[in-house]
Image (cartoon, coloured by chain):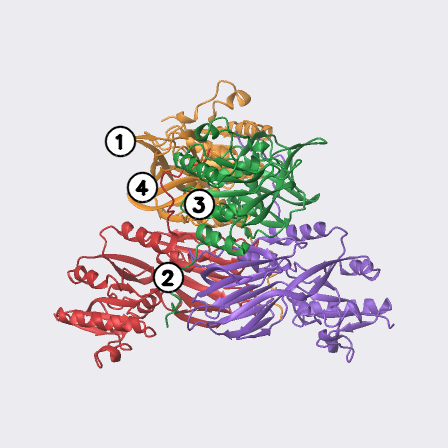
Chain colours: A red, B orange, C purple, D green
Amino acid sequence: MEKKGIAIACRMDSERAIKLAKRIFEFLIKKGEVVYPETRIAPKILPHSGKDLKEMSSNDIKFLISIGGDGTLLRVANGLPQNDPYEPPPIFGVNIGSIGFLDESNERVVFKDLIPLLNGEYNIEKCSKITPYIVKENDEIKLNNALNEILIVSSKHSKVLQVSVRVNGVFLNRSYLDGVIISTSTGSTAYNLSAGGSIITPNTEIMQITPLNSFARSGLRPMVLPIESEIEIELLRPRLNAKIVVDGQQIIKNIQPNSLIRIRKANSETHLIRLSKNLYENYFKRIRKKIIGTVRVPLDDSPEE
Amino acid sequence: MEKKGIAIACRMDSERAIKLAKRIFEFLIKKGEVVYPETRIAPKILPHSGKDLKEMSSNDIKFLISIGGDGTLLRVANGLPQNDPYEPPPIFGVNIGSIGFLDESNERVVFKDLIPLLNGEYNIEKCSKITPYIVKENDEIKLNNALNEILIVSSKHSKVLQVSVRVNGVFLNRSYLDGVIISTSTGSTAYNLSAGGSIITPNTEIMQITPLNSFARSGLRPMVLPIESEIEIELLRPRLNAKIVVDGQQIIKNIQPNSLIRIRKANSETHLIRLSKNLYENYFKRIRKKIIGTVRVPLDDSPEE
Amino acid sequence: MEKKGIAIACRMDSERAIKLAKRIFEFLIKKGEVVYPETRIAPKILPHSGKDLKEMSSNDIKFLISIGGDGTLLRVANGLPQNDPYEPPPIFGVNIGSIGFLDESNERVVFKDLIPLLNGEYNIEKCSKITPYIVKENDEIKLNNALNEILIVSSKHSKVLQVSVRVNGVFLNRSYLDGVIISTSTGSTAYNLSAGGSIITPNTEIMQITPLNSFARSGLRPMVLPIESEIEIELLRPRLNAKIVVDGQQIIKNIQPNSLIRIRKANSETHLIRLSKNLYENYFKRIRKKIIGTVRVPLDDSPEE
Amino acid sequence: MEKKGIAIACRMDSERAIKLAKRIFEFLIKKGEVVYPETRIAPKILPHSGKDLKEMSSNDIKFLISIGGDGTLLRVANGLPQNDPYEPPPIFGVNIGSIGFLDESNERVVFKDLIPLLNGEYNIEKCSKITPYIVKENDEIKLNNALNEILIVSSKHSKVLQVSVRVNGVFLNRSYLDGVIISTSTGSTAYNLSAGGSIITPNTEIMQITPLNSFARSGLRPMVLPIESEIEIELLRPRLNAKIVVDGQQIIKNIQPNSLIRIRKANSETHLIRLSKNLYENYFKRIRKKIIGTVRVPLDDSPEE
């Protein structure tokens, strides 16, 4: 069996990210690793060495280093082969200058973090994904798998959708709203949270439906369901199209009224590399630092009498 | 083996509930059933026939009919034997004049509903419960099991608690807030929802931590965790006591600063009787009617051009 | 002085609205009124009788009847002359098959309501408006006046804006969010409410800034200010355009990064006709029926003991 | 005319606060000022020099220095004479170890801040207050004026109130909820904000009604009204008492079902000393630092492509 390589993907629009990608490439080469830059970044690192994301299965690639932020990591997770016939390789996210909640490392500590990584001293956070389908009569058109969320949203900023929601074939309710977010656990701290959904810890097999700016009494509230559920969203409003946005990456426009969108668990997972032994320690630290914060008042602050 | 009986529990403060309890008692007796009114209601139905909740195990009782609202049902679920050595009997809730989200029937349809019930034509919704413990050095003082939620709340309406939250021994954050709700799936539509938590469908093994009126930037957000997690809430603020309220039934006052409250899955379930075949159909109907509603605008309402 | 006329405007995409417009037209003609259909609807009512909205000042028109929903009324309010040199005529909204919060009447009761209207037995609800300006160096490009709200929103559904907010030249904060709503009192029950802003009663000289899905800790919260304030929103994020949407009617795309949008009180009001003597009675009834509801549990519902 | 004095009030439960009070006392004496410690703190500063809050009118006192946090300042504002016959003196808040949103100074900078204060180089932020009345047949029992908010809350943590809300005699709606907050502009960043109300800038003559944990569809939403409005809250639920809490200071228990609580603008203002020339600059800085924060991501953070 041939030696497995390490892949590098990177933001294209950031000089800082590209520079860091080069330095990581050289570092890994010196360590004797086989390194594949993603095709589009290869010309800036080592011409003719590139490999497409869809050719990077876990059969050839030990892991992929994603340099950028959550956007880069989501693009990579969407572009890697989806379990067919091989699993996608695990991803090691390196954050550069943005929130980067999903990333495990950042530009300040990455070279220190690469040591345990190369020694295989890491854990895998297995992230379930979900898949949207556009239902046409008896056909389903499959869209990309979502690591974070599927957004179904009015195509006009000033016109609310009317949608009907069903779960496992059972009618839940009809609502007026800007849109509906169907989020994974992984995506629960992203758009879902901004829209009022709950945070879901990683080790749960869960989906969440969260309404986006629902009109006052329309009633849909954030709802948590087993990820094995089948969710159906039907667009009811005449003359108002919707868009589907998968992980902020794949955008399908002009979804017609009366269309049905179905969401089910994907048959593929994304594997994220975590250096901490305890997944909760890792997760809560990222939550606290990047999402919810913590009060900094002295511990002895007492109520006034 | 002796014939199993049917138990009846009832609100004491409602003449309507007591009258209905009598009529149900007589109906069941005519049908040849053995019927046990709960001790406190027995004098009003058939003196000397009473039985305490804690003596009603599934060994003797086919099911218990709870007449009132969610408060009655929660009181019953708290009072029945908790899995030791027998499971508690399943509960059939009959709502009288309030929201009664957990109830399966109501005073208008109860006699029609009793027929399939007596024929054993029903499903069981199994509801996991959670237990709070007050930790004293190396000891744990166990409180009642909660079917809906455990509330830890400042003992003064005008003074916020400062709490630290840990899950499975890992620090999450410190927050200023009126209190913390730890809710089951069953309780997710109750106080948890009023406080901003998500709805959790019944078939999930989940707990939710929801802050109660957290001070602006304190950061704790509703968070969904596996029910197998161990949650620890520590009271940090000097000179400010808290209360623990279990299902709105058991109230423990004067919890001192620096106390630690631990919450774990209970070793007992509550079983609720549902007449529908499909649990989602039953659940979504109750959600839609009693909690979230649905828009009633004509289906052909289109955006104006 | 010539006799003043009555204007009629109407949704074009609803047969029901157009039919009702015809019947109202005929009713008014029989009553001896001079009636002007809006130009675009005139061919369907009485060819060659049409008049453009912008020619309908209070100098010629007693009042305008708007047949449709809030969208129609907002379009009319935007299209009428804006105080130059005459005030716009007051608007009487007639709702057809949608929420129609701003409308005073509906298709079922409109002919009954026309009697006091023709007798001048009504009150005027004076609605302050706000105006957005795009600031270019030392120039301001004025957009339409808003009766409900000005929305500044990311042009990509999956990418959050970063905006800086200033009031009267003073920096408030920087936030990540989908967008910002600046709402009038009149618009406070519309998009502002869906996004989490407060309801503002009509008789207040107030604007409200409400963030749209702000990223977890970004901090901007709904904020109420005197309508005389000057709000400035600066778009900070490189390579991400925004849109401005005025009352869901005027849409300005491709607002570039580093653009500055300024909002001030408009020099024009919209006058809405109300048949009730008491503005609160009118307002609360509409709020209760169309926006917030009221509980319907019996008054004697008591807590269970 | 006699020389006016400076008053000092202070938390009693904090050694740090008392020490600072002594140092400020000595500093002011050295500067030749007449200084009056509040009676309860006087024994710890200069025995027999004390003066009660209710004797400190603006006729005798230039200003009062409040040492502690918002709790201390609210206690002082409640205890000073309320406009009868003299205005209360302005208050200069010095924060010690808590949030202290209303305070202008803190222990680190207070001695620097005392210089302009003594020179009269400051502005006054005039804060309107509101007064609750318990209505008994044709009598009104007046409670304390509120600088921040009036809270009407269920006396049992597990039982929701049912209240009816009227404004200027007009029915708004009936709701199930833990309680109702009626907040001033000044109090809008306090409990009102935690409960979901909007922030109201100081220069508005406004009250806000905000529901506390309203039951899912009960409908009352945060609502902003002119401060001249008269709000009436009626307690509807049989056998459930309420408490009224004024500014977290005055607590009235055992308010019976069917009681009516009326809220009107108070005939007294609280005057807070601000050292900045521009009230917005002062206010937004405090808001940003203590309440809403600001993002700290680099300004050049762009969306990933």
Q: Which mark is residue A148?
A: 2
Q: How many angstroms separate mark 4 from mark 1 (CA)?
A: 16 Å
Task: Kindly indicate whether the residue at mark 1 contacts the one at mark 3 (C-beta within 8 angstroms).
Answer: no
The secondary element bearing badge 1 is classed as loop
Q: Nearer the viewer, mark 3 or mark 2?
A: 3
Q: Residue A133 vs residue C166: left or right? A: left
User: Label 2: few (<14), some or many (≥20) within 10 Å?
Assistant: many
Amino acid carrying label 2: it is Asn
Q: Position of residue B163 (x, y in %)?
A: 38, 41
Tell which subunit mark 1 falls on: B
Q: How many angstroms separate mark 2 from mark 1 (CA)?
A: 42 Å
Q: Nearer the viewer, mark 3 or mark 4?
A: 3
Q: Residue at x 35, y 67 (%)?
A: A71
Q: Which mark is residue B230?
A: 4
Q: How many marks?
A: 4
Q: How many angstroms separate mark 3 from mark 4 (CA)?
A: 46 Å
Task: Name the residue beneath numbered marker 3.
Answer: D110
Q: Is residue D221 visible?
A: no
Task: Kindly indicate whether the residue at mark 1 contacts the one at mark 2 (C-beta within 8 angstroms).
Answer: no
Q: Is residue C65 above or below residue B86?
A: below
User: Label 3: few (<14), some or many (≥20) within 10 Å?
Assistant: some
Q: Position of residue D215 (x, y in %)?
A: 53, 44
Q: Earlier in the sequence, mark 4 or mark 1?
A: 1
Q: Residue B141 vs residue D273: left or right? A: left
Which of these two is toward me, C140 or B296?
C140
Quarter of the image where one finds residue D251: top right
Q: How many angstroms separate mark 3 from mark 1 (CA)?
A: 46 Å
Amino acid carrying label 1: it is Asn
Amino acid carrying label 3: it is Val
The secondary element bearing badge 2 is classed as loop
